[in-house]
Image (cartoon, rainbow, N blue to C red):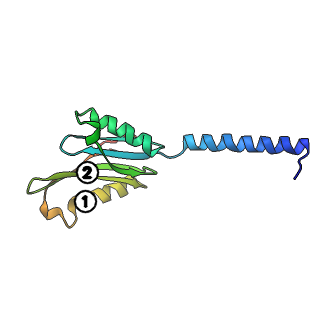
């Protein structure tokens, strides 16, 4: 197929505009959230548009607590991040862990999910359960009250 010079210019302008529009949309798009944990040492989380960059950032934050990079394990990635939370849970026999919630559409939905973690069928075995961090969909930490 042969294009006339005018058609080629129009097609080129359209393609260029489409590329610029797509790259701008990607930069302004939703964020994902990465959670990393070094058992018994520390943890980290970061919001990013890219899983690899998100996990690298979260690993760096985990290492700030004194853990080595090899101990900071990838735990969870959500894209889009939505409303997210870190829930600390401790069994009555001593072991403790974190439950990472993410991808929730609204704060009330996230709070309901955290309540299920703490008051659901396993509640009888827990001595402690609390949301220790909560973030909105743009990555801003919000009060846990």
Q: How far apart are marks 2 and 1 (CA)?
A: 8 Å
* Image: 92 above or below 74: below
Tell me, yes or no, if residue 129 can be seen here.
no
Total marks shown come to: 2
Q: Residue 69 falls in which quadrant of the image?
A: top left
Q: Residues within 10 Å of mark 1 (few under 14, many from 20)?
A: many
Residue 20 image position (x, y, % from top left): 67, 39
Residue at 31% across, 44% down: 36
Task: Work out whether mark 2 precedes mark 1 in sequence or the reverse, and give the earlier one.
Answer: 2
Secondary structure type for disc 1: helix
State if disc 1 and disc 2 touch (CB < 8 Å): yes
- Provide residue 61's location: percent of width, then percent of height: 31, 35
Viewer-nearest residue: 126 or 44:
44
Name the residue rendered at 26%, 62% in the picture: 116
Q: Residues within 10 Å of mark 2 (few under 14, many from 20)?
A: many
Q: Quick one: SS at disc 2?
A: strand
**In the rendered view, does 69 fall on the left or right side of 140?**
left
For residue 117, the mark is 1
Q: Mark 2 points at which residue?
A: 87
Task: Using residue 90 as the reference point, say whether residue 98 is left or right of it.
Answer: right
Residue drawn at point x = 43 percent, y = 43 percent: 52
Q: Residue at x 89, y 49 (%)?
A: 2
């Amino acid at each position: 197929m042969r294009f006339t010079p005018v058609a080629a210019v129009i097609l080129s302008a359209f393609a260029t505009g489409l590329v610029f529009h797509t790259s701008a949309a990607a930069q302004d798009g939703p964020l994902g959230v990465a959670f990393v944990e070094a058992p018994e040492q520390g943890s980290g989380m970061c919001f990013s548009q890219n899983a690899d960059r998100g996990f690298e950032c979260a690993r760096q934050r985990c290492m700030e607590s004194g853990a080595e990079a090899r101990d900071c394990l990838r735990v969870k990635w959500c894209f889009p991040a939505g409303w997210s939370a870190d829930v600390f849970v401790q069994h009555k026999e001593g072991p403790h862990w974190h439950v990472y919630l993410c991808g929730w559409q609204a704060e009330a939905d996230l709070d309901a999910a955290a309540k299920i973690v703490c008051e659901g069928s396993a509640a009888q075995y827990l001595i402690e359960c609390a949301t220790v961090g909560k973030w909105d969909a743009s990555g801003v930490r919000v009060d846990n009250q």
